[in-house]
């Protein structure tokens, strides 16, 4: 089904839901994932943690 929202998605205006972060203590990055509530498209990005040890 293609509603008005789907058109927005085609234009790249996704409706991003809440983001989930995968925070692994052994790594120095957080991997974020966010999903569009309309079309289900996922986007991922990596965030570098700050090094607090020094
Ligand atoms: Zn979308």
Image (cartoon, helix red, strand yellow):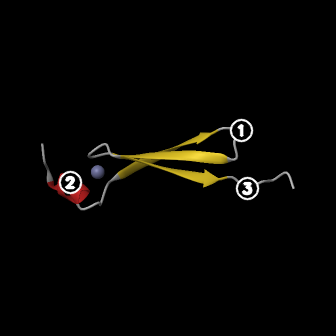
**Local SS, label 2:** helix
Mark earlier in primary sequence (1, 2): 2
Label 1 Cα neighbours within 10 Å, binned few <14 / some 14-19 / many ≥20 = few
Q: Residue 21 appears in which quarter of the rendering?
A: top right
From mark 1 to mark 2, how far is it between C-alphas? 38 Å
Per the image, the residue denoted by label 2 is 5
Q: Is residue 42 left or right of residue 27?
A: left
Mark earlier in primary sequence (1, 3): 1
Q: Residue at x 61, y 46 (%)?
A: 30
Quarter of the rendering occupied by the N terminus: top left
- Say above or below: 11 vs 42: below
Q: Residue at x 33, y 53 (%)?
A: 15
Per the image, the residue denoted by label 3 is 50
Total marks placed: 3
Residue at the extreme right: 54
**Local SS, label 1:** loop
The x and y percentages for residue 49 are 69, 52
Front one among 22 and 15: 22
The x and y percentages for residue 28 are 70, 47
Label pair 2/3, CB-CB below 8 angstroms: no
Report the mark closest to the observer, 1 or 2. Answer: 1
Label pair 1/3, CB-CB below 8 angstroms: no
Mark earlier in primary sequence (2, 3): 2
Per the image, the residue denoted by label 1 is 25
Report the mark closest to the observer, 2 or 3. Answer: 3
The x and y percentages for residue 27 are 69, 41
Q: For disc 2, does the CB lie below 8 Å from ligand 1?
A: yes
Label 3 Cα neighbours within 10 Å, binned few <14 / some 14-19 / many ≥20 = few
From mark 2 to mark 3, how far is it between C-alphas? 37 Å
Q: Which mark is residue 38?
A: none
Q: Residue at x 47, y 45 (%)?
A: 33
């Amino acid at each position: 089904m293609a509603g008005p929202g789907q058109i927005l998605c085609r234009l790249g205006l996704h409706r991003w839901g809440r983001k989930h972060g995968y925070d692994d203590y052994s790594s120095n990055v957080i991997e974020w994932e966010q999903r569009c509530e309309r079309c289900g498209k996922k986007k991922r990005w990596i965030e570098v943690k700050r090094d607090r040890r020094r």
